Amino acid sequence: MNTVWKENALQVIQDIFRNQFFDDSLAITEHTTPADIEEWDSLAHVNLLASIENAFNIRFTADDMANIDSIAVLLATMVERGAC
Amino acid sequence: MNETSQNASDRLVALILQRKPMHRKFLQGSLAELTQSERAAAEQYIRYLLQQDASYEELAECYLTIVQDMFREEMHFKQTGKYRCASYAEAAAAVYDNGDYMRRYMIGLALSSYWWINHIQMLRFFQKTLPATRRGVYREVGPGHGLYFLEAMRSSGFDRYEGVDISATSVALTQGIVASGYFGSFDKASIWQGDFLSERFERPADALVMGEVLEHVEEPERFLEAARSAVADDAYVFLTTCINSPAVDHIYNPETLQGLEALIDRGGFRVLDSCVLPKQGCTLEQCAQDRLPINVAYVVAKRS
Ligand SMILES: C[S@@+](CC[C@H](N)C(=O)[O-])C[C@H]1O[C@@H](n2cnc3c(N)ncnc32)[C@H](O)[C@@H]1O
């Protein structure tokens, strides 16, 4: 995974999380998991991924939806879906 | 309830959240709303399953199966605007004919019925409205995991309890609950495998219950008509279903509350009482506008 792309992607993902949870202090890294962000829960998950799809112009599969459970997996899946 | 008697639930929840922390906020928020007796009922059911040789790992897997599948289906619904299955044959191939999957799915659904606040609210509505002293026949269509059937046997005095389910796995699960003796001794129950649409009953039911069945059928109007002819004129009729709520084997989406109530009317019933539950944290208007899930339970009466 290209480092520059990854850093830019993390920035966009962080903005999406901040907007979704109305929290400008949220910091997202590739090590972030739902255990670190209480609000990243099952109810918010679909909306987060839908916003990421729109921002990167990609489509997750239904299986991706169930498998993505950390930022690391999210980034890898985004690459697989052609975001990079 | 003391701490020891809650150990099985706590241990299972901890295992689930350790595997998928994403479910923490929703699940713990929901569990916090349960009454003591609801916690005790959930604990008893989990202990029953453990006694039937299920392990904590298997039970966690059952629960995670339904929530992970729900994610998948929600995404599919968001992208296509439709449920994945359009026919009973597709749902049967994906779910009903797959005994191992069906068992996991039903046990996961049972746990959600005890733990999720929207499901608990529907169960409370059932407990509040089921006539406790009425006699005659209690008939349940699609008892599935068997929890409504169990609740009815425990809290009412019908002369006979009948359950018909199209899935062999569901029949085995409900029969298991009745025959185990774990929840009490119930000798007035009979549960068999069959398609409700082809059943011919000896006598009309005095109570008919259809929990989460309408969304699984191809022709819900025909199903309601069959329900109408299976009940006495003054029967208690209870049903739950959902709107915009995709799942692996959901076929029928009424789209709106008005659409659903129109269907009930066409099926020959009128609504006496209802319990309408928009997705947690959302209003009914938001759900309608953004096509988000709404759970509903109705008590209906046969129209003359
Ligand atoms: C989602 S489960 C509902 C379980 C439980 N009643 C509840 O409220 O959670 C749906 C059940 O309906 C059964 N079912 C679906 N179509 C049916 C039919 N035509 N006749 C009888 N049972 C049917 C399924 O096999 C399954 O056990």
Image (tube, rainbow, N blue to C red):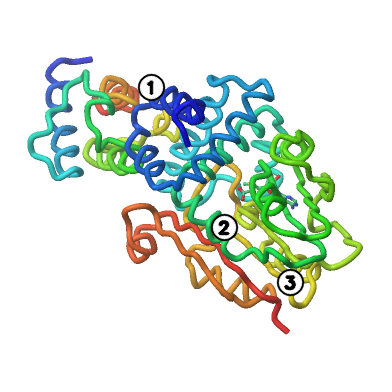
Toward the front, the furthest residue is B2
Residue under the image location 77 percent in, 77 percent down = B233
Q: Position of residue B77 (x, y in %)?
A: 45, 47
Residue linked to disc 2: B241
Task: Give the camera-side residue of B200 and B125.
Answer: B125
Earlier sequence position, callout 3 versus callout 1: 1
Of callouts 2 and 1, the N-terminal one: 1
Q: Residues within 10 Å of mark 3 (few under 14, many from 20)?
A: many
Q: Quadrant of residue B92?
A: top right
State the SS at label 2.
Answer: strand
Q: Is residue B70 left or right of residue B270?
A: left
Q: Is residue A70 above or below residue B208?
A: above
User: Left or right: A26 with respect to B137?
Assistant: left
Q: Quadrant of the C terminus of chain B?
A: bottom right
Q: Report the residue marked by disc 1.
A: B18
Between B175 and A73, the residue placed more toward the observer is B175
For residue B235, which numbered disc appears in the image?
3
Q: In this image, B4 relative to B148: left or right?
A: left
The Cα atoms of the two marked residues, 2 and 3, are separated by 19 Å
Q: Nearer the viewer, mark 2 or mark 1?
A: 1
Give the amino acid type for the residue marked by disc 2 in the picture.
Answer: Thr
Q: Is mark 2 within 8 Å of ligand 1?
A: no
